Image (cartoon, helix red, strand yellow):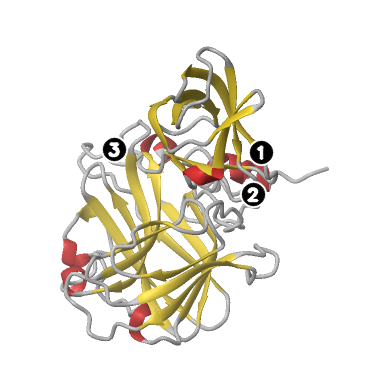
């Protein structure tokens, strides 16, 4: 006989964690990227977690997917390593580590109306020394936010932060669509523009910029600084439940809704098929997982690909005329002739395993 769960505030055991890739197990782009400093906002290593950095940052870091997670939670974590310090912080500087959410994936908040629910964010964190940082929930649909501080030590600790419900006046629910509605952001560095007034920590409120990060330390204070995080979870209710373990195949599928790297382990691997439009152009169909929105495609390098046409090959000089769908695209590979109009072609890698196509639909 099994015992029923008795905590009415705890949501279903499967799917309660709204964070994607909280165990930091998927890193399609790279395991490590160096030289991340001013204006390096974007996704670099672990999927769904981005850095957001101001153009005025003097600090520089290396971001790595590292096999140093807490036992029983995850083998992996994200490590940030300060490589250039910034001890003279300009007012507009900031560094955030964050994940963004579609509105339709967070309707369980019930935000902005009667019956809105509390939300708990939990995560495992450590650093090279003692620090205080901030965790912010930011509503992009309605310009509202709330931040709570947390302390970091040199040992792995689980931080549990419960955020109040935002009933507001009934006018600020999350939009029920595939666009950006919410950030969960970890504030690691900020100037006076973001720290100049008392922190907005007790309740959701209309965003006031200088109340977003007051009281935090600076990750860029010393080149000895490291920051490690994993086991990130966001769930409904006032209780931080056990970190939800998820099969890697499920996590990868979730990540590939936003970003997918199509690659091959074969030096002459297949990427798509189509027909010769004329002697100089092959129209190629590329298939990928269904994306959040119409994506963009980026090719590793034109020199990594060739169009095979029977016994003839045409090396593309450029890819153009791309027409996107949610799960497929048409791409024109333009070269220097040799194709026969109307006959079948395939796009393959040209004697390299470095060829890839990035399909991007990030928020």
| Tally of numbered tags | 3
Give the Cα distance between marks 2 and 3: 47 Å
Q: Can residue 14 be seen in this snapshot?
A: no
Q: Does dot 3 land on a helix, a strand or a loop?
A: loop
Q: In the drawing, does residue 142 fall left or right of residue 59?
A: left
Query: In x, y percent, where is residue 200?
Result: 24, 64
| Residue labelled with disc 3 | 173
Mark linked to residue 269? 1
| Residue labelled with disc 2 | 353
Q: Nearer the viewer, residue 331 or 73?
A: 331
Judge whether 179 appears above or below 272 on screen: below
Give the Cα distance between marks 3 and 1: 47 Å
Judge whether 244 appears above or below 315 on screen: below
Give the Cα distance between marks 1 and 2: 8 Å
Name the residue rendered at 62%, 64% in the picture.
76
The N terminus sits in image quarter: top right
Name the residue rendered at 36%, 75% in the picture.
60
Query: Closer to the observer: label 3 or label 1?
Result: 1
Q: Which of marks 3 and 1 is nearer the N terminus?
A: 3
Q: Nearer the viewer, residue 86 or 353?
A: 353
Query: In x, y percent, where is residue 125?
Result: 52, 71
Query: Closer to the observer: label 2 or label 3?
Result: 2
Q: Do the residues labelled 1 and 2 touch (CB within 8 Å)?
A: yes
Q: Does dot 1 land on a helix, a strand or a loop?
A: loop
Q: Earlier in the sequence, mark 2 or mark 3?
A: 3
Query: In x, y percent, where is residue 120?
Result: 45, 56
């Amino acid at each position: 006989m099994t015992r029923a769960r008795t905590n009415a505030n705890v949501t279903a055991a499967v799917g309660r964690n709204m964070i994607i890739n909280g165990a930091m197990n998927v890193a399609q782009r790279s395991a490590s990227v160096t030289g991340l400093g001013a204006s390096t906002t974007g996704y670099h290593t672990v999927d769904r977690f981005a850095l957001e950095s101001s153009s005025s940052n003097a600090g520089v870091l290396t971001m790595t997917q590292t096999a140093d997670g807490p036992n029983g939670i995850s083998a992996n974590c994200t490590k940030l390593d300060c490589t250039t310090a910034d001890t003279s912080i300009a007012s507009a500087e900031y560094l955030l580590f964050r994940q963004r959410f579609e509105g339709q994936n967070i309707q369980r908040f019930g935000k902005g109306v009667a019956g809105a629910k509390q939300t708990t964010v939990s995560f495992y964190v450590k650093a090279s020394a003692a620090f205080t940082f901030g965790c912010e929930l930011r509503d992009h649909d309605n310009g509202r936010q709330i931040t709570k501080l947390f302390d970091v030590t040199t040992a792995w600790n689980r931080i549990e932060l419960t955020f109040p419900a935002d009933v507001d006046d009934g006018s600020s629910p999350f939009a029920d669509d595939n666009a950006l509605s919410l950030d969960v952001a970890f504030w690691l560095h900020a100037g006076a523009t973001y720290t100049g007034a008392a922190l907005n920590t007790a309740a959701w409120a209309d965003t006031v910029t200088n109340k977003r990060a007051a009281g935090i330390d600076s990750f860029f204070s010393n080149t000895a600084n490291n920051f490690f995080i994993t086991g990130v979870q966001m769930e409904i209710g006032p209780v931080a439940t056990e970190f939800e373990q998820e099969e890697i195949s499920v996590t990868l599928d979730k990540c590939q809704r936003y970003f997918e790297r199509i690659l091959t382990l074969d030096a002459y691997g297949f990427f798509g098929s189509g027909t010769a439009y004329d002697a100089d152009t092959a129209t190629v169909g590329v298939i990928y997982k269904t994306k959040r929105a119409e994506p963009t495609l980026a090719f590793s390098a034109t020199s990594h690909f060739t169009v095979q046409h029977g016994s003839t090959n045409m090396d593309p000089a450029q890819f153009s005329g791309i027409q996107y769908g949610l799960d497929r695209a048409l791409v024109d590979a333009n070269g220097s002739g040799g194709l026969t109009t109307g006959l079948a072609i395939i796009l393959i890698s040209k004697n390299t395993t470095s060829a890839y196509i990035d399909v991007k639909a990030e928020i």
